[in-house]
Structures are given as C-alpha cells and as structure tokens.
C-alpha cells in the first residue's frame, strides 16, 4: 500500500455545508435584521461563504432581504430576516386520547391548529382520519398558497432510530407499525420530507429548536400524560440531535423502576414509574370513567382527601423522576408538559418540592437546572415534529 488514507472529502464537505447553512439560518432567526457582514463576524465564517449560503437561502425563500443597514464601519449591507410567508411545516401528534395537527411557519409560529378529541383506533383507520384532516388543512385559505416542506408525525412509543417504524405503543396496543407507509399513499400531494418520531422526542426537539433566546447545551422534555416519557436533545445550538439509543429506548423513563415489587405495569414489569404517576395509574386509583379526562374529572374533586393524597404521592414520584433525570443526564433545562400538568399545584407542588429538597445531596446544584412547566402543551409534540421537518430540510443536500 502506498500513501496515506484520504479523508472522505465528499462527506465532510456536505456536512460542513449543512452546518454552515444551519448556523447562518440560526443567526438570522435569533437576530433578525443582521447583515451578511454581521453574520460573518458572529459565525466566524468567511464573507464569501456567508455570501454564497445567504444567496442560496434567499433563493429558497427561507430568508428575505430588508432595508440597507450600516454595519461595522464597512459598506452598508441589506438586513436579513427569516421569510415566514412562503412555506409551511406540518406536524401531527397521534396521542393516546386525541389527535393534534399543526401547520406552522419556518419559525414555529402556528398558522393552523386542530385538536380532535378522538382516540386512535387501528393504525389503518387512524391514518385515514389523519389524511382527511391534513387534506382539509392544506386546502385552508391560510396556507393553501404556501409551499409545504413536509410532514412530521409523532406516536406515543419508541420509534426505531434508523427507520420510520413504531416499535411499540403500549397504551394503544400497536406494535411494529410502519405508520408512514399507511399515511403516505393517502397524501401524495405532500412531496417534502416525511418523518416519524416518538412524541416526547419530537417535543424535546421542538422546545430546543424553537427555543426563545440562546438554547442550552442540552434539554430534557418530560411528557406526563396517559403514559410518561421523555426526550433528550443535545447540540451546539445549530444542529441539535435527539439522543435515541440502540433501539430507540432512550427516554422511556416511564418504565424505569421506582418501587421494586410494586404494581404491575403495561410493560409486564412491576413498580415502573407509570404505576405511580401516569394518567392511567391515577385513573385506576380514583376510578375515573374512561369517557372522562383525568384533569376534568379531578378538578371538582381536588379537596377530597383521597384525591389529594393520590396526587401528592403521584407528585412525589414525579419529583423522584426529576431527581433521577437530574443525576443521570444533568440537563441545564427540564421542560414538563403533557395533560397531567393540567392538575396544577396538587401534582406539581409535591413534585417540585421533592426535587428542590433532594437535588443538592451530591453537589450544590442550586440554580443550575431550570425547570419550566408548560401551561398548555397541547401542540408541543406536533410543533416539535414540524421542527424536525425543518431540520431535515436544512440538512438535505
Ligand atoms: Zn413499565
């Protein structure tokens, strides 16, 4: 053999190009009105690189030019802004109890939202219902003139990391479902990027991608609904990545064990987190009929001692889970969403109290982790799936 191995220039160039494109888009999104010269200073890229990529982004209509601006003592340059008027991203969240659809701009601003209080039945029927609703949305006056960059779908269970295959949704009884293969043929008009993800992963991605201000170095989204899941996103602010693991199980914290020998879980093990805090466990403990939502059933009953005790115990279990996440992943930010946050203080105060009282046992971590509870996370996962479509478009050649 002669010579040294050659680096894989093609792959590296393509990666660099995507990374630079992403960095420039991100810079304009966070500081609308910047000029090409400002971007070169802020990103450390050469003016020639910035010029070429900005040209491409203007051509795609992801950016638009504004007024002439003086910057840094040089020649005046055109200000640049995200172009929120040309494209639309679609996201769908098929949850255990309802279907949520969103159409949003490239910056994540909602254009249309639909919440159908309709539980998924079979995968085939659910694909049919969703296709009809998506087609209705696409025909709506608000978005019909926009170019659709693609559709992201979320389901409540682990998704294979290397293909759009739902491995298992225990609370739906679905197993090994290539859901996009059912949906795609019904919507041939959507020609952009298609993707399938776990609901909590997508929500985490969206909270990171559309983060107000500078995103943290990593973020965990804790989804507390019928089941309990989480998503972990890490990144340098430009190309965030969902950490998925070998089989897509990263973040399936609802099935970590908090009580050895405890109650049986849907997964077959005993004492999982979900047996202590989840919509289904609270429903079973307090005999809530299936046709009623947990939050609406419990709001009028919060002063009943049995309800208060059940929610306090569930809240403490949630606090333990937060503590375990803090010690295993140490994210600077944890976002809590999902329908159970609608139970308010009865659940959240014991959870946050438990966390506050125990988090500094190992290191003094006061102020090092921000916990943000979403008041309304109805469309968080759907919007996250839309964010993943955008990231896919940015990363495409
Ligand atoms: Zn379990």
Image (tube, grey):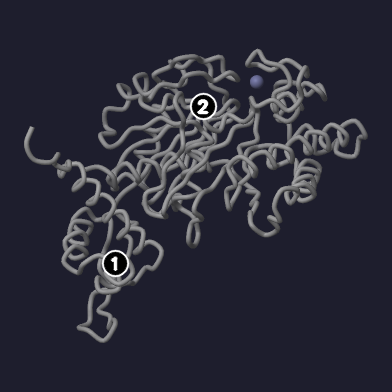
- Residue located farthest toward the front when viewing the structure as drawn: 1
Q: In this orientation, which residue lies closer to the viewer: 140 or 14?
A: 14
Q: Is residue 95 left or right of residue 181?
A: right
Crowding near the residue tagged with mark 2, few <14, some 14–19, many ≥20 C-alpha atoms within 10 Å: some
* Quadrant observed for ligand 1 in the rendered image: top right
Q: Is residue 253 left or right of residue 143?
A: right
Q: Is residue 213 above or below residue 144?
A: below
Label 1 sits on residue: 44
Q: In this orientation, which residue lies closer to the viewer: 142 or 18?
A: 18
Residue 346 is situated, as x and y percent measured from the top left of the image, at: 81, 42
Measured in 3D between alpha carbons, the distance from the residue under mark 1 to the one under mark 2, in whole angstroms, is: 37 Å
- Residue located farthest toward the bottom when viewing the structure as drawn: 73
Residue 249's label in the rendered image is 2
Earlier-in-chain disc, 1 versus 2: 1
Q: Secondary structure at mark 1?
A: loop
- Residue at image coords 36%, 36%: 151
- Residue at image coords 14%, 39%: 5
Residue 126 is situated, as x and y percent measured from the top left of the image, at: 47, 21
Q: In this orientation, which residue lies closer to the viewer: 187 or 391?
A: 391
Q: Quadrant of the C terminus?
A: top left
Instruction: Report which quarter residue 63 is drawn in.
Output: bottom left
Q: Secondary structure at mark 2?
A: loop
Q: Is residue 221 above or below residue 82?
A: above
Instruction: Report which quarter residue 267 is drawn in.
Output: top right
Q: Is residue 108 left or right of residue 299?
A: left
């Amino acid at each position: 053999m002669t010579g040294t191995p050659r680096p894989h220039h093609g792959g590296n160039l393509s990666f660099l190009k995507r990374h630079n494109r992403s960095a420039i888009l991100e810079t304009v999104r966070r500081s609308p009105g910047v000029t090409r010269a400002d971007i070169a200073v802020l990103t450390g890229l050469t003016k020639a690189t910035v010029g070429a990529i900005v040209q491409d982004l203007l051509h795609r209509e992801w950016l638009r030019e504004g007024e002439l601006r003086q910057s840094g003592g040089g020649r005046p340059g055109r200000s640049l802004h995200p172009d929120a008027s040309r494209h639309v991203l679609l996201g769908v969240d098929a949850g255990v109890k309802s279907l949520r659809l969103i159409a949003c701009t490239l910056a994540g601003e909602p254009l249309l939202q639909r919440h159908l209080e309709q539980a998924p039945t079979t995968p085939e029927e659910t694909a049919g219902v969703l296709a009809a609703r998506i087609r209705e949305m696409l025909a709506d006056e608000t978005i019909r003139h926009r170019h659709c960059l693609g559709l992201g779908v979320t389901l409540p269970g682990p998704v294979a990391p290397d293909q759009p295959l739902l491995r298992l949704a225990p609370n739906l009884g679905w197993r090994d479902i290539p859901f996009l293969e059912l949906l795609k043929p019904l919507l041939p008009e959507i020609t952009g990027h298609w993707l399938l993800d776990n609901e909590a992963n997508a929500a985490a991605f969206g909270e990171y991608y559309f983060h107000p201000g500078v995103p943290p170095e990593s973020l965990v989204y804790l989804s507390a609904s019928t089941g309990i899941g989480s998503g972990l996103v890490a990144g340098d602010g430009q190309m965030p990545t969902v950490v998925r693991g070998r089989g897509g199980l990263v973040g399936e914290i609802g099935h970590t064990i908090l009580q050895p020998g405890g109650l049986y879980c849907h997964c077959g093990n005993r004492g999982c987190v979900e047996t202590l805090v989840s919509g289904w466990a609270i429903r079973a403990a307090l005999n809530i009929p299936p046709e009623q939502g947990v939050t609406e059933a419990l709001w009028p009953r919060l002063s009943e001692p049995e309800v208060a005790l059940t929610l306090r115990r569930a809240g403490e279990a949630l606090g333990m889970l937060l503590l375990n996440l803090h010690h295993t992943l140490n994210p600077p930010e944890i976002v809590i969403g999902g329908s159970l946050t609608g139970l308010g203080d009865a659940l959240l105060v014991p959870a946050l109290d438990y966390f506050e009282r125990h988090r500094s046992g190992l290191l003094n971590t006061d102020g090092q982790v921000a916990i943000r509870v979403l008041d309304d996370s109805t469309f968080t996962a759907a919007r996250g799936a839309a964010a993943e479509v955008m990231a896919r478009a940015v990363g495409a050649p």
